[in-house]
């Protein structure tokens, strides 16, 4: 779902993990889905498929609030 939501946005756009949680469960239960979202974020980050940031600065791992965006790969 993370990659699907990112694919629907402009290249440099980001999303909040809570947006992913809301997309995979009901609006009332999204907080309970956050551990699943965090696990997926960790996996995709390890694979290099996404990057994380906070207030425009790249971060290497989940810690506190963060935004998710596509990985920027050099070609």
Image: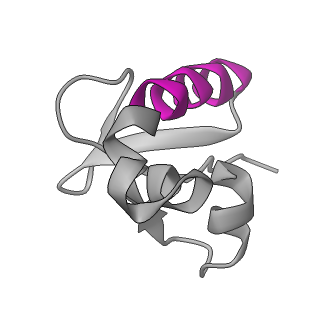
Which residue is pictured at 40% across the width and 63% down the height? 27
The image shows residue 12, relative to residue 42, as above or below, that is: below
- The foreground one among 52 and 5 is 5
**Toward which corner of the image does residue 55 lie, by quadrant?**
bottom left
Report the span colored magenta: 34-47
Residue 15 falls within the magenta-colored stretch: no
The image shows residue 14, relative to residue 17, as above or below, that is: below
Instruction: Describe residue 52's horizontal placement relative to residue 65 as left or right.
Output: right
Which residue is pictured at 51% across the width and 54% down the height? 20
Which residue is pictured at 43% across the width and 24% down the height? 35
The image shows residue 20, relative to residue 59, as above or below, that is: below
Which residue is pictured at 64% across the width and 18% down the height? 46
Q: Magenta stretch: dominant SS? A: helix
- Residue 59, image x, y percentages: 32, 31
- The foreground one among 61 and 8 is 8
- Residue 31, image x, y percentages: 32, 41
- Residue 70, image x, y percentages: 61, 54
Instruction: Describe residue 69's horizontal placement relative to residue 7 as left or right.
Output: left
Instruction: Describe residue 6's horizontal placement relative to residue 14 as left or right.
Output: right
- Residue 5, image x, y percentages: 64, 66
The answer to whether residue 67 of the structure is visible from this angle is no
């Amino acid at each position: 779902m993370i990659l699907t939501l990112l694919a629907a946005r402009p290249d440099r756009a980001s999303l909040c993990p809570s947006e992913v949680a809301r997309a995979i469960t009901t609006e009332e239960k999204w907080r309970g889905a956050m551990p699943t979202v965090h696990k997926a974020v960790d996996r995709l980050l390890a694979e290099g498929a996404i990057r994380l940031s906070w207030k425009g600065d790249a971060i290497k791992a989940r810690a506190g609030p963060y935004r998710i965006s596509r990985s920027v790969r050099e070609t």
